[in-house]
Image (tube, helix red, strand yellow):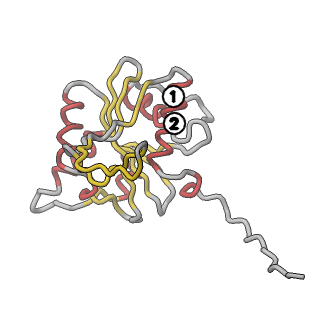
Amino acid sequence: MVHYPIKRKAPAKAANHANLGMTLETDIEASNTYYRLHDIAVIHKKPTPVQVVNVSYPARNKAKITEAYYKTPSTTDFNGIYRNRYIDFDAKETNLKTAMPLKNIHVHQIEHLHAIHQHGGIAFLIIHFKRHGQYFLLPFPLLHQYWRLQHDKENGRKSIPYQVFLESAHPIKFGYQPRLDYLKVVDRIYFQQKEPEGS
């Protein structure tokens, strides 16, 4: 007779917002699916253009891409239409507790979001502070303010402090459906719509 070791269950961990979603991107995609299914908005993840260089054919009916590269730098991750307005944004995560590094944002992304903002579109970042388990919507004007400050010799800094997010950005609640209801925040900022009490 063979005696197998008994597997003991690990003690249950306290619920943590950082563990509820798989990744920020999948949580946003799940939210976007919810918005589309409920006819709230049409927002998709942008496909990244790739140039295929080499393909291997290990079998007649199977092809495997062995070499490829990005054709052009991607602008932002998500875009679409909400309440007759064009919406365009990117998602960023940080493991730091005290700040969001500006090096995580590329120059071409700033230029792209600036153009969207200038033409009357809704442009922002969704930032996830993983160590705090918190999500924020950072409107482009505030992002642009700190982007320009990094080149200021006296006041320049290479990040946006966490305290700025607490004071001036907009928290996004993590829930079940949708997981990240960022459009509720968009309503408040861009459409001056007040949330019902108790929500």
Query: Where 178 sits versus 59, above or below?
Result: above
Cα gap from disc 1 to disc 2, whole angstroms: 6 Å
Q: Nearer the viewer, residue 91 or 7?
A: 7
Residue lying furthest top in this view?
Answer: 84
Q: Is the Cβ of the residue at disc 1 closer than 8 Å to that at disc 2?
A: yes
Kind of residue at badge 1: Tyr
| Residue 98 location (% of width, % of height) | 37, 64
Q: Nearer the viewer, residue 176 or 187?
A: 176
| Residue 84 location (% of width, % of height) | 37, 17
* Count of marks, rendered view: 2
Q: Quadrant of residue 51?
A: top left
Residue lying furthest left in this view?
Answer: 153
Which quadrant holds the C terminus?
top right
Q: Quadrant of residue 140?
A: top left
| Residue 156 location (% of width, % of height) | 16, 60
- The residue shown at (28%, 27%) is 121
- The residue shown at (50%, 25%) is 36
- Neighbours of disc 2 within 10 Å: few (<14), some (14-19), many (20+): many
- The residue shown at (57%, 54%) is 17
The residue singled out by tag 1 in the image is 35
Instruction: Check residue 137 in the rendering and tell me which mark sits there, or answer none.
Output: none
| Residue 125 location (% of width, % of height) | 34, 43
Query: Where 193 sits versus 152, above or below?
Result: above
Q: Quadrant of residue 103?
A: bottom left
Q: Provide the secondary structure element on which disc 2 rests.
A: helix
Left or right: 191 as drawn, with respect to 12: left
Kind of residue at badge 2: Ser
- Neighbours of disc 1 within 10 Å: few (<14), some (14-19), many (20+): some
The residue singled out by tag 2 in the image is 31
- The residue shown at (41%, 29%) is 43
